[in-house]
Image (cartoon, rainbow, N blue to C red):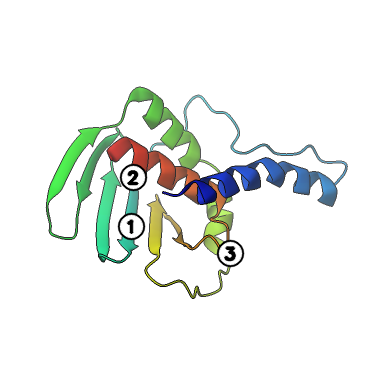
Amino acid sequence: MRATPVAATLLAALLTPLAACAQNGDAPASTGPAPTTAAPAVPVELTKSGGIVGLNDTVTVSPDGRWTRVDRTGASRTGQLSAADLGRLRQLAADSRLAAEAAATVPATMCADAFSYRLTVGPTTTGYVDCPPEATPPPATAAVVDLLTRATG
C-alpha cells in the first residue's frame, strides 16, 4: 500500500479522541478499543478486489488464528497468525468502531482501478475503496486490513 493512506489512517485515529472531547466536554475521550484480556474470538474474512489486474483475493481467519488465502485463480495458501497478531486481531474485532463504520453511508467513488476491501468480522461487514484523494479509510476497518495484509502476505 502507499504511505499516504497509512498516514491518513494514523492521523484520523489520533484525531478521533479529540473530536469526542469537542462534542462532549464532560465525557472522557475514547482512545479506541477498550483493552480486554479475553476478547471474543470470531471468524474474520477479508476480500481485496479490483486494481488494474483485477484482483479477487480472500483471506479467511478462524477464531484460533489459522488462516487461508485464496486468490482469483483458486490457488490457496495457509498459515497461522502469531500470538501477538491473533491478540491484536481479537482486540480489533471487539472494537465498537467497526459497527459504526459498517453503518456509515459512504458515497460512491470515482476512482478507476482502485482496490476495494470488504471485511466481515463475525456478523459485521464493512469496507472501503482505497482512493486516497476522495476519502480516508475508516480507521478500525483499515487497521484490520493492514494487520491481515501484513500477517498473511
Residue at image coords 33%, 45%: 43
Q: CA distance from mark 3 to mark 2?
A: 22 Å
Residue at image coords 59%, 42%: 10
**Where residue 28 sits in the image (x, y, percent)?**
79, 37
Q: Is residue 104 above or below residue 146?
A: below
Residue at image coords 40%, 24%: 84
**Where residue 51 sits in the image (x, y, percent)?**
33, 64
Q: Which residue is mark 2?
A: 43
Left or right of 76, for residue 9:
right
Left or right of 83, for residue 100:
right
Q: Which residue is mark 3?
A: 104
The numbered disc on residue 48 is 1
Q: Nearer the viewer, mark 3 or mark 2?
A: 3
Mark 1 residue element: strand
Residue 96 visible? The answer is: no
Q: CA distance from mark 1 to mark 2?
A: 17 Å
Q: CA distance from mark 1 to mark 3?
A: 20 Å
